[in-house]
Amino acid sequence: MGNTLLRTKLNIPQIRSSLVPRQRLVDKLDAGLEIRSGTFARKLTLVAAPAGFGKTTLLGEWIYKDRRPVAWVSLDEGDNDPALFWAYVITALQKVHPEVGHDALTLLQVAQSPPVTAILTVLLNELAELEASIILVLDDYHTIEARPIHENLDFVLDNLPYKVHMVITTRADLALPLARLRARGELLEIRQSDLRFTLEETTIFLNQAMDLNLSAEDIAVLEERTEGWIAGLQLAALSMQGREDISAFIKTFRGLDRFITEYLVEEVLQSQPQAVQDFLMRTSILDRLSGPLCDALTGQNNGWQMLAQIERANLFLEPLDDEQHWYRYYQLFAKFLRQQLRQLHPGSIPELYSRASQWFEDNGFQFEAVDHAFEAGDNERAAYLIEKSILPFFRSGEVPLTTVRAWLECLPDELVGSRPRLGLTAAWTSLWIGQPDAAETRLGQVERLLTEGSAEESWGLERRNLGELAAVRANIAYMKGEIQETIQHAQRALDTLPPEESFLRSISYNALGQAFRLDGQPLAASRSYSRSAAIGRAERIITTGLLASGYQVRVKAMQGQLRQAQTAFQEALDFASQMGVSALPALGVAYVSMGDVLRQWNDLESAGAKLHQGIELCQQWQALLATVLDGYMSLARVYLAGGNGQDALEVIDLAIRLAERYELPQSLAQVKACQVWLWLAHGHDTAVQDWAKQAENHTSRKMSFAREPEERMLARVFILQGGASKATDLLSRLLQAAEAAGRMADVIEIRVLHALALQASDDVGGALATLERALQLAEPQGFVRAFVDEGPAMEKLLRQAASRGITLDYVNHLLEAFRQTPYPKPPAMAGGQPPAQPLPNPLTKREHEVLRLIAAGLTNREIAEELVVVLGTVKAHINSIYRKLDVSNRVQAVSRARELQLL
């Protein structure tokens, strides 16, 4: 995204020599930077007044006075995309502190980026570590209308480190809860009444800056009728220059908006040569001006000369950079000029926007090219530009999805539906924002166009385009859980796409790997992930490179290759480091997968840390919810292994609610099977028996990889209920399927269970022989929990194995792990919990509501929607809940609350 940012927006405006010193306001701004205990006492200075009151000029004077370390962003209507807005903010901060914001900026650049609040959390944490203070100025914030940005800014202000002070200029009050900041003494306000020129300042401005030599009476009249409005005074002064009877002019001056805009400004315009008037009106459609861009609109070759002439005439033209390559008109003046253009030359406006669009396209400003095509009313050109640029944007991650979505919504539906490339663009966009059904609808339109022959023949016959159709179809099928269809379409895409289509091929290989993994074919999945990751690394495609690497950790573990899984995890970290990211949701897959490997190695502390990290990352991206549930299941087993039975049950309860809420039946069945493991550990026999009856009814001779976790759990229940022979029959079928697919981790688990079944049948010899085969498979990769999790019966069998010298060193290692494993603490539902203790600082009513919704499995955003508050408010409540309960995450909060009978 860095190449799409206009760096002049980050420059502090230059101070003109005609500036009227405003020391009283500079002193007030200084008061906003009061230091207490080494940090800013206030978080925000708000400078709010209508246009033309000198807000920006005042800040420029204040900043240059003491050469303060300031990050500056000049905002406009084009910054209403959250990703673009925060990219400008972060880049501005980096001008002062180059070391901050790199991870956050990278996250914003990814097509499937995490929620902005998660990215801002990364940024805020880095700002909190700064040793030096910094001021962040957001100029012209009134141009921002996007509610998500207001919510994000509220979150930032709520959590702003006290070494950072924010200054915002705006024409209207912010859509933020300012009352809270006022109550805390964290807000300094400079309003219209402060910014008005005093009589003394008006005198200095008119007689010194504008050199009018007016009488005190005339100055008083102007000051009264303009009410100190600086722009009105400036416009009046310009109209007075060169007049002989200035006093007579002043007597007729009324200072009304209509008079200012229709009389004084027209007088200024009409006093200019016709060539200057034409130039001003034609170029007024531009937010920013340069000589070559102006030439494109006027058809002349004098853009630089005209801009210099206008600047010398003080006609509301402001340079945006020190080199004076870019300028802008003052907003009121530009608005007036556009009004004049509409009145005098309405037919020229579409052509002017078209010329601007062409210039922006030719000079690499694709966003501006599209926007100006829309302004020209040229939907066909806008469609062409979107088609031309969208896949490169997606490939590099340098596109805010909300912007692309807004573009597509601006186009007539029949136009999108009549152009294959545009239809595919809409399909990809729907996929990235998690709407596979909408993507399928668009793709169906494209395919009908080709079938009916209503699309361009050359487009339909190109192999590359046919391959892209298949790639989109494969990803739609994957998102809908259609495994065989995913394999079919992904393979067709790979067979069709030429080698240079790296982005599409990487996505297709990743979809293929996902399908094979979900179908229980780790070898095929590993090959596909390897190819996807290799392309991603070679071509610097961050998302597919990290996702494929993360899932590679998973499938290596499925194959029983735990050490190779660790290598794959390190490769994922290395790629993330190479790309300059560390907190991307796609990286969460690798952390969750590695967390389970560490659990298997009995490194419970490291496993828990990795799982928490991975879950938090994956939670930012709903497409990774299945991985979140996998992480919760592994975390529950970590808690159980560490003797924290209550935490284990709470984690699984949370996972079940999430799976039910988002309608993930396959994941739900697996989570419930994990819950049965916890019930077994805590003696909840009735619940186990009820589950087993239902599970046994679903068991059939036809094997399904998706149901194997349930069936292995059912075998455990059979063994404990005296049904060892039923367990043996079931395990034999499971073993055959696992060995055939090369799922050696499952093979080890199944053989361990088979040994326990034989032990329960008093076939000690058979049990030890089966156990020995499991040990031989497990020892090279260091499996521990596959044995220890099975409890006392396995410990007894291992002691018998040790007495016979079976893999003695390894068996002794496992027995030592048994000795270090505590018994699980009884859960609250089992009785015996201590009576509830009151909190020293009780929860508020609102915090109780938030806690209840956390326990129900709602995300922060869903809680905000439920309670009709902004996201930052929810975050603040959650932080307060954590502090009062003395916990650090959701699972602990729910567990602690139930211990205290708060839920």
Image: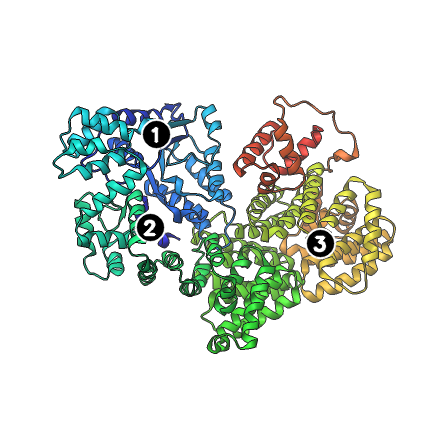
Element type at marker 2? loop
Q: Which residue is mark 2?
A: 6
**Left or right of residue 75: residue 654:** right
Task: Give the x, y percent position of residue 483.
Answer: 65, 64
Closer to us: mark 3 or mark 1? Answer: 1
Amino acid on which disc 2 is placed: Leu
Residue plotted at (27% across, 57% down): 293
Residue plotted at (62% across, 21% down): 840
Element type at marker 3? helix
Task: Give the x, y percent position of residue 799.
Answer: 76, 47
Which quadrant of the view contains residue 54? top left
Element type at marker 1? helix
Closer to us: mark 2 or mark 3? Answer: 2
Indicate whether 529 appears above or below 58. Answer: below
- Classed neighbour count for the residue bearing mark 2: other residues with Cα under 10 Å, few (<14), some (14–19), many (≥20): few
Task: Give the x, y percent position of residue 520.
Answer: 67, 62
Numbered label attached to residue 665: 3
Amino acid on which disc 3 is placed: Pro
Q: Which is more toward the observer, 1 or 22?
A: 22
Q: How is the image coloured?
A: rainbow
Amino acid on which disc 1 is placed: Gln
The answer for how far apart the CA atoms under marks 3 and 1 are is 59 Å
Q: Is residue 454 visible?
A: yes
Q: Which residue is mark 1?
A: 192
Which part of the image, by quadrant, shows the C terminus?
A: top right
Q: Earlier in the sequence, mark 3 or mark 1?
A: 1
Q: Earlier in the sequence, mark 1 or mark 2?
A: 2
Q: Which is more toward the observer, 491 or 383?
A: 383
Which quadrant of the view contains residue 816? top right
**Left or right of residue 71: residue 773:** right
The answer for how far apart the CA atoms under marks 2 and 3 are is 47 Å
